[in-house]
Amino acid sequence: MPIGYYDDWVKAADEESKHFNMMCDCLESHSSFYGAMPAHVGMWRAAEDTANDFLGRLAVVPMVLEARGLDVTPGMIKIFEAAKDQQVVDALNVIYSEEVAHVAYGSKWFHYLCGRNEIDPKPKFHELVRKYFHGSLKPPFNEEKRAEAGIAPDFYWPLANEMQPPAMR
Ligand SMILES: [Fe+2]
């Protein structure tokens, strides 16, 4: 891959470590700590599921899971504003602004790889998300920030509310 690919993900990793530390600080301010409360393992599960599929990793981790963060973070910020918890509001605002770039890196390199291999990106994205993502994409979507990150509505809307029977999961 071109050097820019590695530069992008090193920057994303640096920012993720900062986000983690900010969340740890918030938890400690509330006399808690990371690990004290249950959390979903969606990101780790996606990493395992796509361990051998480069395009699948780009489709699911930045373009689905991190894009989901863009959808839900504004609502979380409102909740903590109402609770007058400025430390959390500030942390979430930093995360929200920096995550747009992470989603954009995913989209940029997904399209780059599709172009290099003469693959039509949209049907490939749908195929990979259906293969590796367990669940359906949940609207409402943050269309503005998703567009800013380079993800068009016809990438995610066809995957919204595609519910599978529990036995097939
Ligand atoms: Fe991220």
Image: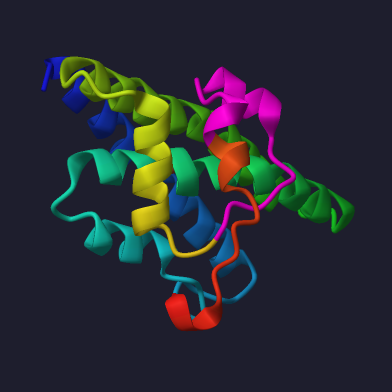
Decide if residue 138 is on the left or right side of residue 69: right
User: Viewer-proximal residue, 20 or 45?
Assistant: 45
Residue that appears at 21% across and 18% down: 118
Which of the 4 image quadrants contains residue 51? bottom left
Which quadrant does the N terminus fall into?
A: top left
Residue 113 position by quadrant:
top left
Residue at figure coordinates x 44%, y 76% from the top left: 168
Give residue 3's position: percent from left, percent from top.
Answer: 13, 17
Q: Is residue 156 magenta?
A: no
Coordinates of residue 64 in the picture (x, y in percent)? 47, 45
Magenta highlight range: 136-155
Please determine whether, in this image, residue 133 is positioned above or below residue 129.
below
Q: Quadrant of the C terminus?
A: bottom left
Query: Is residue 6 something one can see in this rendering?
Result: yes
Residue 102 in the image: above or below residue 53: above
What's the residue at 73%, 52% (across, down)? 76
